[in-house]
Structure formats: C-alpha cells, structure tokens
Amino acid sequence: MWKPLKCRKDAVLSAVREIAADEEGVGVVEIILILVVLISLVVIFKKQVTQIVKDILNKATNEAKGI
C-alpha cells in the first residue's frame, strides 16, 4: 500500500521541483502550496468540519419543518 503512495509523492515532489526551477512557475508553486495546506487542514479537522455541517443541516431541516 505504501509503495503507490511513495511513487505519487515522488512524482509530485519532482514536478514541484521542476516547476520551482522555472521562474515563470513561481505562481503555480504558490498555488500548489496553498492547496496542500488547505487539504491538510481539511484532513486534520475532518471530524469537526463534518459535525459542523451536520449540525447546520439539522438546524435548517428543523427550522424548515416549522414553516
């Protein structure tokens, strides 16, 4: 299971290095890094985000029933 992940990681890292070497790709690298941070935050706080969304949907459903 870890070998495919390692291959993907290596491929992503080599792509990032290749883009970083090119001055024109600096904006792309920044966007990739921002996406990595956002995805990491979602993975870390997945349970909390899921619970918040469930609470909001339950509240909306309960209030809609009252109309």
Image (tube, rainbow, N blue to C red):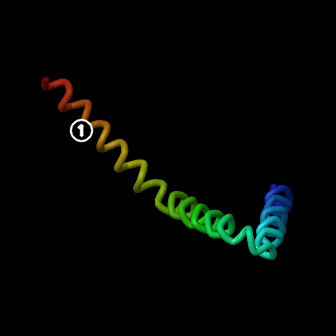
Residue 52: x and y, percent?
Answer: 34, 50
Q: Quick one: 43 or 37, which is closer to the camera?
A: 37
Residue at 86 percent across and 60 percent down: it is 7
Image point 19% across, 24% down: which residue?
A: 65
Residue type of the residue flagged with mark 1: Lys
Vertical arrangement, residue 58 with respect to residue 23, above or below: above
* Left or right: residue 39 compared with residue 16: left
| In this rendering, position of residue 3 left or right of residue 51 | right
Q: Position of residue 8 (x, y in %)?
A: 81, 59
At label 1, counting other C-alpha atoms closer than 10 Å, the crowd grade (few under 14, some 14-19, many 20 or more) is: few
Q: Is residue 53 left or right of residue 36?
A: left
Q: Quadrant of residue 6?
A: bottom right
Q: Is residue 61 above or below residue 34?
A: above
Name, please, the residue furthest toward the left. Answer: 67
Q: Residue at x 13, y 23 (%)?
A: 67
Identify the residue position indicated by label 1 in the image.
Answer: 59
On-image quarter of the N terminus? bottom right
Quarter-wise, where is residue 11 in the image?
Answer: bottom right
